[in-house]
Image (cartoon, coloured by chain):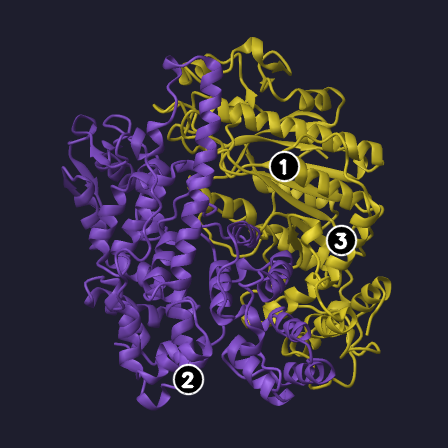
Amino acid sequence: MKHSLHTRRQFLRTSILGGALSWTVPAFLERTFFTLDAIAADSAIQSTTGKDGPILIVLQLAGGNDGLNTLVPFADDAYFRARPTLAIPAAETLRLNDALGLNPKLSGLKSLYDEGQLAILQGVGYPNPNRSHFRSTEIWHTASDSSVTEKYGWMGRYFDSCCKGEDPSVGVSIGSQPPQAFAAPEPRGITFSRPEQFRFDLKNTTDRTAADGFFRSVNEPDSEQMEGGSIGMLAGHAEGTGSALDFLQRTSLDAVMSSDKVAEIIKRTKPGASYPSNRLADSLNLVARLIGGGMPTRVYYIAQGGYDTHSNQIGAHTKLMEELNSSLTAFCADLKSQGHFDRILLMTFSEFGRRVAENASGGTDHGAAAPLFVLGGKVKPGLHGSTPSLTQLHDGDIIHRVDFRSVYATILAHWLKAPVEPILKGRFPLLPFV
Amino acid sequence: MLAWLPSNEWTLEAAAHLLNRAAFGGSPSEIRSLHALGHANAVRSLLQAREDEDLFPAPEINPMEVLRPRADTMVPEDLAERRKMVQIKVREQTQELRMWWLQRMASTPYPAREKCVLFWHGHWATSIQKVNDPFLVMQQNQTLRAHALGAFTPFAKEMSRDPAMIRYLDLNSSKAGHPNENFARELMELFTLGEGQYSEQDIQEAARAFTGYRINPQTGGFVFGRKLHDTGAKTIFGRTGSFDGDATIDLITSKPQCAEFLSAKIWNFYAGQKPAAPLNQVLASEYRASGMQTGDFLERIFLSREFYSRKYRRSQIKSPVQWLVQTCKILERPLPDTKKTQGALEQLGQVLFAPPNVKGWDGGRAWISSSSLLLRYNFSGALVRDGASDAPDIEKILPAGASPHEACDLLSWRLYQAPMDPALREKTLHLLESNASTPAARRDIVHLLMSTPEFQLT
């Protein structure tokens, strides 16, 4: 049996506790069935709309971006003393004021800054910084204290508390693996890198209708067994709790539903023409198409890798800055021409900055606090916070001035309009960047 | 201690579980042969198999450093040309190495060792993306193979001197006075003890012990730079001495947490679940009792009743490499050509010699996203249909004359090594009844049964 996209979506959103459960209903549906009442009653549920809701895009600069060579404190002698070979001369930076300038490659971001669409938050980090990539990435993704290991992600907890009953595509991550930020007891969110492969391919089958029918009946159990509104929302990805089979069945259902939707959007939108050719640009281009096509997604997650510059940093970091700049510039122009720039807020982050002093290999080792960028049509632009000291350090690293969870709290409260405390499990001062 | 599996519980399904987990699975006839050996002999045949030395000759490649241009000896145009040539060579040779290893997994008479090499590759994760020299990567792969089933402490020492590792974790720029902490940190955090079992000071001091480790650019071998080594006193885990790298590894591996950490990781890889604390204690004591000999420890695991418990059966999500190699084995077909094989593994998220980071692959549920699941479904279709003479023999998998019920039994055993879920069986019967006359239609059925959540489990 085939449902139209519209009815299936509606069908999955409406939470009705149904009657006759056939024995063919998979166990995971049966179990989640009884939690439906509670979900339906939850007044915090916000309805998704692909046309007008605010959108958050999170861009991870993976590997630990060198904050000091991104936002350069060119008036500080300590910077030049610590970096005899790596320091960027004052004259080369794109000056923001008498003390700070952007990396010379960030010309597009400088324009956004001048136009009042870029906020730069200085000295963002957390107490007792961890210098392991994995642990620090985990801390950023889960918004936990440095001493606490938390399994679920801050976006996962947001989806969990505010997006129950919505499409699985409320979170979209471009890549091959879902980010830990999406992990939740009942995770939502889809992950893919190339839309044309995000589709079950029937072209080599002898009888497409029969094959499609069988495929849907084993991978999308709602379309057959639950015909007639016997079951509504399917909650419970059951990460960590259900069996591996439950998890696979749920993911399979998500995949079939969202691939129908992505295919439909890709069919009627065109790729933006002005993007440079690199992986980050490809990801941003795809995100722009999905936004333009009305995908009901609130959070997009993308990453740019390669920032772990322990040796020979200059060439590598320059190239990364260039890619970051050209890709973001193209993306912003694209969204402006679509008329969606005011709906988006893009934040960058990196698991840590790098050590103030360069090392013997022409690179920098793992550090701590660093600046991050927030851009979009509605940001409160400019430099936020005070510039961290390069002489008062902790083990050679910059001491943070702003807890990263204040950034999350601000985005949750002021941008996504979500309750902060249940998601971040604590109170953090809000910042005036949005 | 782990209790043994009673002999009456050594069933065909138990044999399939062993072959799937200890190696890369096999066809129904391979499972039958393994079962016929009896439990103890089956385990021994897997762990003590032999492979002729010249069965898988390593690709003939040389250290890349020799070819790398030196800026002072060339004009800029030649320099750029040479750099490009080197990059192409790196890419081609790496592809060649990947196929060489995958072929070995798929066709060696000693697949349990290759499975264990795959485990250690994810453990001592090292990526060509940074190492940038296929020769070094191949050399590391051979080192992993030589030590995979042997004792851990000498293995760890060998890995600290492994040139690919030296380059990957920046030991090659670590010297007395300027130690680079990268290797020392990952050694403790990821390779031996686990997070929280050491202090920052332990890392800083251990980093000094590993100073002076270098690579000979001509041979790609290890050299010890005596003058670069920090011979001073170090304090590690509260003990002070002029420890060198090997002595540091002895200090680390003699900590009880080392056997706990490794035995849990090995168990998780083979059994498919992290052991709860009481089981972890048992496993750690078994591992210690074996002198941290991984092969002996695996024998204990594969003979244990615990390993065959219901909760582990068909509960492990196949890694992409496992999925590909096992699928080819159960379909009795060769691996697809280089391009298809590499494309599939890249998109499914497991590129050999290029783990995402030094932590290796997360594994388990992290292999599965909506997109990777759809990709698996689509690649299944190619494995069932593609490759004129390479395509599987459908008459063998699903013979023309089989009744729908017989066909269900055959498919179920071959694809899942277990009975089908009743709902799935009913749908499959319906499909078989409506159209299984042509070979192409029967291939469709095999493809569809592989395009299911069930097929992702082993």
Discs 3 and 1 share one subunit: yes
Q: Residue at position x 57%, y 63% from top?
A: B383
Can residue B217 be spotted in the picture? yes
Callout 3, which amino acid? Val
- Above or below for B288 versus A29: above
Check disc 3: other Cα within 10 Å, few if <14, some if 14-19, many if 20+.
Answer: many
Please give the residue where the numbered disc 2 appears in the rendered image: B12
Q: Residue at position x 53%, y 30% from top?
A: A370
Between the residue at mark 2 and the residue at mark 3, the CA separation in whole angstroms equals 44 Å
Please give the residue where the numbered disc 3 appears in the rendered image: A262
Can residue A129 be spotted in the picture? no
Q: Chain of mark 2?
A: B
Between the residue at mark 3 and the residue at mark 1, the CA separation in whole angstroms equals 20 Å
Q: Quadrant of residue A95?
A: top right
- Above or below for B448 versus B305: above
Q: Secondary structure at mark 1?
A: helix
Q: Which chain is the one coloured yellow? A: A
Residue B385 in picture, x, y percent from top left: 61, 65
Q: Earlier in the sequence, mark 3 or mark 1?
A: 3
Tag on residue A280? 1
Q: Which chain is the one coloured purple? A: B
Task: Pick whichever, B294 or A228, lies toward us.
Answer: B294
